[in-house]
Amino acid sequence: MHAITIPEPGGPEALVWDEVPDPVPGEGEVLVEVAASAVNRADILQRQGFYNPPPGASPYPGLECSGRIAATGPGVSGWSVGDEVCALLAGGGYAEQVVVPAGQLLPLPKGVDLKQAAALPEVVATVWSNVFMIAHLRPGETLLVHGGSSGIGTMAIQLAKTAGAKVAVTAGTREKLERCAELGADILVNYREQDFVAEIKEATDGAGADVILDNMGAKYLDRNVKALAVNGRLAIIGMQGGIKAELNIGALLGKRAAISATSLRARPLGEKAAIVASVREHVWPLLDAGHVRPIVDREFPMSDAAAAHRVVEDSGHIGKVLLVTS
């Protein structure tokens, strides 16, 4: 088969479409013929040499995919050759075939195109596990999503609205904020021109955000704590703004607030399977009913992954950027 390899870390040109050995499913695994994968920030970090795959994972980038089951390994039940699926991966999505633990498979939702389904697994699992399973967003609460026009952001807006929450977002252009509003965002903050702490306080009559989903890390830590409501929960899922910052413990104590920080890729198989099972139970019916949908900006041939990476690095997209095999 062919896959995107990274012979040496570097810029987008480091991504090479090359012939590699065919993968073989082992115990509890299935082989998926890939229709599409999606570009995530983690893929860019891997390309740059900063985020290696966990032990035993495929060396090729790609944390999610969609396609058809081509073969099943020993001990697999509930899935058959030919089933249309999407999957959460620890790596290997940028390829014509990938081996997936059966517990990380999801059926193709009703009304969703097979290729576009590649935009779902990573964002849905990330949002659901952080905003709902950990931060326990409740109806009537306010969720602040940084990077509201990203793949994570566009999914967080939709899921929070279906849960009866009020949604605030930050984004860097009017066009991106308008798209967030179309998805249901109530409070729109241009982070280039406005202070999100002041805007959230004003929009919530001084209360603040009950839950904040943050992709920035260090750069926003202090202001995120200031923007939290009493009993607020800050969920950190990224480090685009750095990894080290000072934290005012007094401010955190004063608000009886909580901070969580998670990633999906290196979690044990059992934890990933539990998240995927919860997603299938709670989110897949929303997709089947058309209440939630994948937001796809554009598609590139998988062999031209470098072009897709340039778009994502430039933040020139809304929603997800896909890599398709044909």
Image (tube, rainbow, N blue to C red):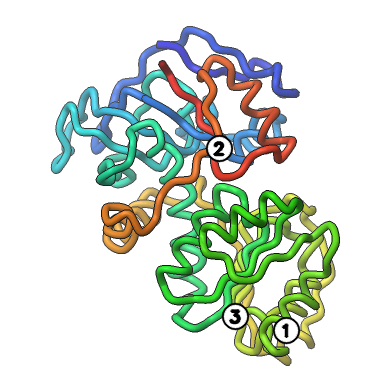
Tags 2 and 1 in contact by the CB under 8 Å rule? no
Q: Name which residue lies at 44% across and 76% down.
A: 164
Q: Which residue is mark 2?
A: 297
Displayed quadrant of residue 244: bottom right
Residue carrying label 3: 210
Give the residue at x 48% y 68%: 160
Horizontal relation, residue 167 to residue 191: left or right: left
Residue depicted at 53% across the width and 9% down the height: 18
Q: Gap between marks 3 and 2, in whole Å?
A: 30 Å
Residue 40 is situated, as x and y percent measured from the top left of the image, at 58, 39
Which amino acid is tagged 2?
Answer: Asp
Quadrant in the picture for residue 95: top left
Tell me the distance, in whole angstroms, between the alpha carbons under discs 2 and 1.
38 Å
Q: At 27% across and 56% down in the image, what residue appears?
A: 289
Q: Quadrant of the C terminus?
A: top left
Q: Is residue 38 above or below residue 215?
A: above
Residue 238 falls left or right of residue 57: right
Disc 3 to disc 1, C-alpha distance: 13 Å
Q: Which structural element holds mark 3?
A: strand
Q: Which residue is under mark 1?
A: 252
